[in-house]
Image (cartoon, grey):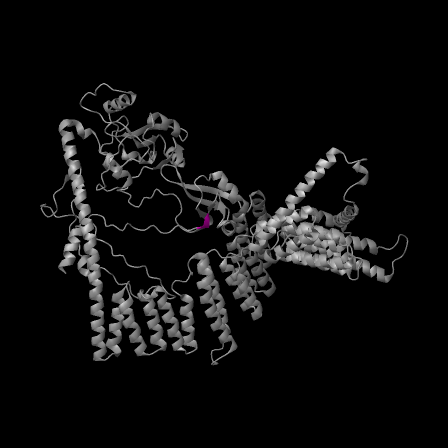
Amino acid sequence: MAAAGAEAAAVAAEEEKRLPEGDPESGGDSEDEGDSDSSGDGEDEEKENEAEIQRLEEQLSINAFDYNCHLDLIKLLRQEGELIKLRRARQKMSELFPLTEEIWLDWLKDEIKMASESAEREKVYELFERAVKDYICPEIWLEYAQYSIGGIGQEGGIEKVRSVFERALTAVGLHVTKGTALWEAYREFENAILETAQPAPGSIPSPEQQQMLCSQLEKIHTLFRRQLGIPLLDMEASYAEYEEWSEEPIPEATVKNYKKALQQLEKYKPYEEALLGAETPKLAEYQAYIDFEMKAGDPARIQLIYERALAENCLVPDLWARYNQYLDRQLKVKELVLSAHDRAVRNCPWTVGLWIRYLLAMERHRVDHSIISEMFEKALNAGFIQATDYVEIWQAYLDYLRRRVDFTQDSSKELEELRSAFARAVEYLKQEVEERFSESGDPSCTIMQNWARVEARLCNNMQKARELWDNIMTKGNAKYANMWLEYYNLERAHGDTQHCRKALHRAVQCTSDYPEHVCEVLLTLERIEGTLEDWDAAVQKTETRLARVNEQRAKAAEKEAALAKQEEEKAEQRKQARAEKKASKKAKKPKAGDKRKADEDEEGEWGQEEEQPSKKHKGDGDGLPLEEDMEVETGLFGRSGAAKPEPPANQKEKASTSRKDLPKVLHDSSKDNVTVFVSNLSYTMANPEVKLKELFESCGEVTEVRPVFSNKGTFRGYCYVEFKEEKSALQALGLDRQVVEGRPMFVSPCVDKNKNPDFKVFRYSTTLEKHKLFISGLPFSCTKEELEELCKAHGKVKDIRLVTNRAGKPKGLAYVEYENEAEASQAVLKMDGLTVKEHVIKVAISNPPLRRLPEKAEAGKAPQFAVPRPVYGARGKGRTQLSMMPRALQRQSHPVAKAENGMVQNSPATSSNPPEEPKKMSNADFAKMLLKK
C-alpha cells in the first residue's frame, strides 16, 4: 500500500537521523597506522573539496547562468554536509532555472529528514508548492501527497491531503503510464479512512457513524468510476479490483465509460510505445504525440503532453514557443499562461523570442507595469548570443511603453518614460552591445527611426524628429538612398516643402549607391511644387552630380579594362607558348591523337579556365599539382614515347620509363556515377595504383585506379578510382580528408563542371548553425581529443572538426557541434576568452560570412561596378531599384572566340555562318566603347 510505504519511509528517515556519524564501538582500542593514513587522506580530500567549492562560487559570481556550475556546487556541498550553504545554493539556482525532477526530489528528501516540528513542515509544504510549479512530474506530486499524509493528525489534515490528491489528479491524473499510481494512492488513503470509521466488532453503529460510513464508501466508489473513465495502462486490473471490492454490481454507465476508455487507450498505445523505445530526448516522438492530441482537441490532454515533452526537452526553445503560443491563443488562462512563459525564459534565457512573447503575455493579461519593467531588466541580463537580439528586445519594450501613452495629452508621465527609454536604448546599444559584439546590431538605426516617427506623427514634434534623423545620417547612413528617402517621406507627411527640398539636395550630394533615384525624386518634387528657379537649381545639381558619378565609373572601368588587357596579353602569350610546344611535340610524335590533354581533363573536372598562370612543377615534393603541368594526362601508366628511353640511372627513372612505355587509359565520362576523383596526394607516393586500390577496396570492388602522371612519368598527386557499383563510389566519399602519407586526401564526385557549373564540392554548411561553435586562436598543437575534453564539460559534443590546410597542417580553427543550441550557447558564455596553452581562444556561434566574388574581372567579361550594399530601414528596400549600368553598355555583341586544342578559331566576324549566340565583349572592347561616350 502506498500509505504504508510512505510511513515506512518516514520511519527509516527518522532512524537515519538518529544514527551517530560514527559507531564508537567499531573504532577499536587505539588509533593504528591505517587509521591515521585514512584520516590524512580524508583531510586532503576535504581541502580539495573546499578549494573546489570556493572556485565554483567565484565562477558563479562572474556568470550566474552557468547551469553546470550550479549542479557541481550543489553536489559538492551535499557531499560535504554543508546544509546552510547547500540551501543557499539550491535557492539561487531555483531563482534562475526551473529545477529538474531529480534535483527537486533530492532537495525535498534532505529537507524532509530535518523537518520535525510543525513550522518546519510548513516550510517543506512551501518547497513542494514551488517544485510542482516548475514541471508537471508525477513522482513529485506522489511524494507531496504521501508527505501530507504525515500531517493528518493536525487540524484540517485530512482535507489538506484530499486537496493535494485532487490537485495532483488534475495535473497528472491523465498521464497514460504514470497516472495509475496517483489514483491508487488516493484510493488507498480513502480506504485507510474507511477502516478507521468502522465500528468496533459486535457494536451497532450510530446513525452518524452509519452516515459517515456511507459517505466514505461513496468517495471510494467515485474514485473508481472516475479512474475507469480515463485511458490508463493496466485499466483491466483496476476494473477487476473494483469488481472485487464492490458489493454491488458495477453501474452500466461506468462499464460503458470503461469500454470507451479502453478503445481510446488503443489509440494512445503506439505513441506511448514509441516514447518507451526511443532514446532521449525523444523530440520527434513527442511532436507526433502532440500533433495527435491537437487533432483530438482536448485542452487538458494537450497541456499534459506538452508538459511531458518539456520535462525531457526543457532546453528546446521552439517547443516552449509552440506551447506558449497554444496557451496564448487557446486556453488564455492567466495563471497557466504566465507560468509557462516564466519557465520558458528561465530554461532558455538566451532566446530573445521567448522574452518578447513573455512581455506581450504580461501586457495582454494586464500585469502591473513595475513587474513588466523588472522582467525587461532581467531580459537585458540574460546573455543573448547576437547583437540583433538586444535590438529586438528593446524594440518590444519600447512598443509596450508606446502603447501606454495617451498622445491626446501634450505631456504625461508615460510619454516622458517612453522618451527616456528611447534615449537609454540608443545609449545601451552604443555602449554595452557594441563593446561586447563589436557592433551595435542596429546599423540602420531602426530604433532611432521609430523614435523619430513617434515624435513626428504622434507628438507633432517635427523638430525633434529632424534632430534624430540628423544623428542617424552621421552614423554612416548618408550614402544610402533608401535612408534619405525614408526621411523625405517622413518630412513630406509631417513637415514642409522647404525641408523636403533641403533633404533631397543633401541626398543628391551624399548618396553613392543609387544617386539616380534621389535625383529623380528631387526633379519630381520641383516639377510639382517648385518654381522655375527651384527647377533650374535642381537640374543643375542633378546633372553635375550624375556627370561626376559617370566620370568616376568611367575611370573605374578604364582601370579595370587596362588590368584586363594585361591579363589577356599574358594569357595570349601563354597560349601561344603552349601551341608552339604542342606543335613541336606533334612533329616528334605523330600518334599524339591517342592522348588526351590533361588541361582539358582538369577543366572538365573542376571547371578551370585555360588562361591560368603557367607555373612549372619542379621535382617531386608534397606540393599541390599545378594547372599548367597537366598538359597531357598519361593515364594509368604514364605517357608513351616514340623513342626508346636511355638506360635508367636509378630505380625511380626505371619506374618513370616503364610508365611512359605503357598504353594510355582514357577516362569515360559515362562512368562518372561509379568514379570518384582523388586529389591532394603526395607526389612521392610509390605505386599509387596498388596503394589506392587497397585503400578503396573497403568501400567495394574497385574496377580500376587511374593515376595521372607528368610528361616525365612522375605522379601528379591525383587520380580516378572507378568502382563496379555506384553505391561503392558513394561510400568512398566518406574517405574524404583521410590522412594518407601525412596529407589529407580529397575525395569528391567525378563531375564535369562544364556541364554542371553550379556543382560545389564543399560539403559543410555555410549558413547560421546555432548548435555549432566556431573556435579560433587555438594552438596548432591542440588535438581533437584535447578540444573534445575541453568542450564536453558544457554539453554533449556530437562532432569536432579541426580546420587544416591542404598539407594537413592545423590552422588554429575548429568547429564543434553540440546536441542542441542551448548547450552551444552555454559553451560560448563559458569558453569565449579562455586561455588554452597560453593562447586566448575566441568562441562564437557558427555563422560563416558570405563568399565574396573575385574582384578582378575575368577575360571576356564586362567589369562589375562595386556598389555599396545598402542597409535597409524599417520599410525595406526603396520603391525602385535602378540599374547602375548605362543603357549603352547593355548592348549584346558577338562572343570572342575561345582557344580549343591549342588553336584559335576564326572569329564570327570572318565566318560565313551567323553566330548562334550573342558575342560577349572583352574588357578592352568595353573600355573603348565607354570612352567613346
330 left or right, relative to 839:
right
Residue at x 51%, y 75% (from the top left corner): 414
Q: Is residue 484 above or below residue 827?
A: below
Q: Residue furthest right?
A: 202
Q: Residue 428 in the image: x percent, y percent? A: 47, 64
The residue lying toward the viewer, choosing from 920 and 681, is 681
Q: Residue furthest top?
A: 647
Secondary structure predominantly adopted by residues drawn in magenta: strand
225 left or right, relative to 646:
right
Residue at x 14%, y 56% (from the top left corner): 929
- Number of numbered discs overlaid on the protein picture: 0
Residue 843 drawn in magenta: yes
Write the start and end of the magenta stretch as one range. 841-845
The quarter of the rendered structure image containing the C terminus is bottom left
Q: Residue 715 in the image: x percent, y percent? A: 29, 29
Residue 22 drawn in magenta: no
Whether residue 183 is visible here, answered yes or no, is no
Q: Is residue 864 above or below residue 604?
A: below
The quadrant where residue 542 appears? bottom left
